[in-house]
Image (cartoon, rainbow, N blue to C red):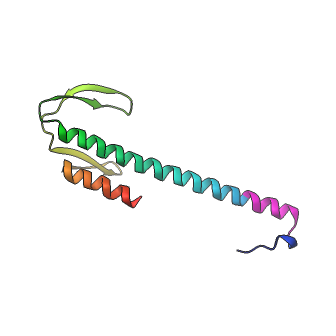
């Protein structure tokens, strides 16, 4: 929508300015969320590489949260549980899980 600023009141200009600032803020937040999601998929691919390199039975650090890890032992490093959204999980092999992360990252 084009607005001739010579024909609008100062109050309308202020309102237009606020509207544009709100749109910029929403776009900035959305962009930040997309970058964050992309980074999470990248981190997941790195974790999958780590899991693939570890053979079954070797000790490794298991993440309980993003900052809390405990020692553990992995019996099968070929199958993982892949969260696909909305609390749904699929059992996949590591290569398919990496491909999923790559695909989602490219979509974002």
Predominant secondary structure, magenta span: helix
Q: Is residue 91 above or below residue 14?
A: above
| Left-right relation of 89 to 24 | left
| Left-right relation of 50 to 23 | left
Q: Name the quadrant of the C terminus.
A: bottom left
Q: Is residue 5 above or below residue 28?
A: below
Task: Please report the residue visible at 28 percent of the width from the left and 55 percent of the height from the top.
Answer: 100
Task: Please report the residue visible at 47 percent of the width from the left and 53 percent of the height from the top.
Answer: 34
From the top left corner, tell me how far across and down residue 30 is, in percent.
53, 54
Quarter of the view holding residue 61:
top left
Total numbered badges shown on the rendered structure: 0
From the top left corner, tell me how far across and down residue 4 is, in percent.
81, 74
Q: Name the quadrant of the N terminus.
A: bottom right
Quarter of the view holding residue 17:
bottom right
Task: Please report the residue visible at 28 percent of the width from the left and 40 percent of the height from the top.
Answer: 47
From the top left corner, tell me how far across and down residue 21 is, in percent.
70, 56
| Magenta-span inclusion, residue 76 | no
Task: Please report the residue visible at 60 percent of the width from the left and 55 percent of the height from the top.
Answer: 26
Quarter of the view holding residue 49:
top left
Q: Which residues are magenta?
A: 8-18
From the top left corner, tell me how far across and down residue 5 is, in percent.
83, 70
């Amino acid at each position: 929508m084009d607005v001739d600023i010579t024909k609008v009141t100062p109050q309308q200009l202020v309102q237009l300015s606020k509207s544009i600032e709100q749109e910029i803020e929403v776009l900035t937040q959305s962009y930040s969320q997309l970058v964050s999601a992309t980074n999470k998929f990248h981190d997941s691919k790195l974790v999958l590489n780590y899991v693939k390199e570890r053979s079954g039975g070797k000790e490794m650090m298991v993440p309980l949260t993003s900052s809390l890890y405990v020692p553990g032992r992995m019996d099968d490093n070929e199958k993982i549980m892949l969260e696909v959204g909305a609390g749904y999980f699929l059992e996949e092999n590591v290569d398919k899980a990496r491909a999923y992360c790559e695909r989602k990252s490219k979509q974002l």
